[in-house]
C-alpha cells in the first residue's frame, strides 16, 4: 500500500471512529496485511498526539495536565461503551 492509500484509509478509519462505528473500522482494516494495519495505527497515533499538543498550546495548559485530561476522557469513553 502506498502512502496516499494509508492516508485515505486512515481518514476512513477516523470517520468510522467519529461515528462510533467500530465494526465499520474493523471491516476496513480486515483485508489489510499486518504491515499496512501497523502503518495506519502509527498514523492514527501521530494524529492523536498532534491534536493533543495543539490543544494544550491553544488552551495554555501544561501538556502533562492535558495528557491527564485526555486519559480521563478515554477512560470515560471506555466506561460508556463497555459491554
Image (cartoon, grey):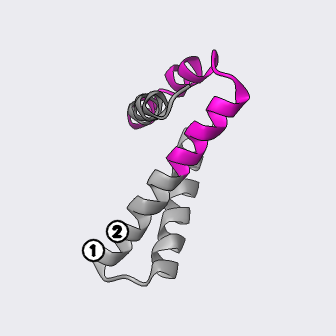
Q: Residue placed at 42% from the left, 61% from the top?
A: 50
Q: Nearer the viewer, residue 37 or 71?
A: 37
Q: Residue placed at 48% from the left, 69% from the top?
A: 69
Find the residue positioned furthest to the left.
Answer: 58
**Where is residue 15, by image quadrant?**
top left
Depicted 82 relative to depicted 61: above or below = above
Quadrant holding the C terminus: top right
Residue 6 location, x and y as percent? Answer: 49, 32
Q: Residue placed at 57% from the left, 17% from the top?
A: 27
Q: Is residue 60 left or right of residue 20?
A: left
Residue range highlighted in magenta: 16-45
Q: Residues within 10 Å of mark 1 (few under 14, many from 20)?
A: few
Q: Please report contact status of discs 1 and 2: CB closer than 8 Å, yes or no.
A: yes
Q: Nearer the viewer, residue 28 or 74?
A: 28
Q: Secondary structure at mark 1?
A: helix
Depicted 7 relative to depicted 66: above or below = above
Q: Secondary structure at mark 2?
A: helix
Q: Mark 2 — residue?
A: 55
Residue 60 location, x and y as percent? Answer: 31, 83
Find the residue positioned furthest to the front.
Answer: 2
Residue 7 location, x and y as percent? Answer: 43, 35
Residue 49 location, x and y as percent? Answer: 48, 61
- Alpha-carbon distance for marks 1 and 2? 5 Å
Whether residue 33 appears in magenta in the rendering, the answer is: yes
Q: Mark 1 — residue?
A: 58
Amino acid at each position: 500500500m502506498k502512502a496516499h492509500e494509508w492516508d485515505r484509509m486512515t481518514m476512513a478509519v477516523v470517520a468510522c471512529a467519529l461515528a462510533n462505528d467500530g465494526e465499520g473500522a474493523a471491516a476496513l482494516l480486515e483485508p489489510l496485511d499486518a504491515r499496512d494495519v501497523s502503518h495506519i495505527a502509527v498514523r492514527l497515533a501521530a494524529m492523536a498526539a498532534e491534536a493533543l499538543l495543539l490543544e494544550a498550546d491553544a488552551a495554555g495548559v501544561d501538556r502533562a495536565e492535558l495528557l491527564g485530561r485526555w486519559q480521563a476522557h478515554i477512560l470515560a469513553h471506555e466506561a460508556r461503551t463497555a459491554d
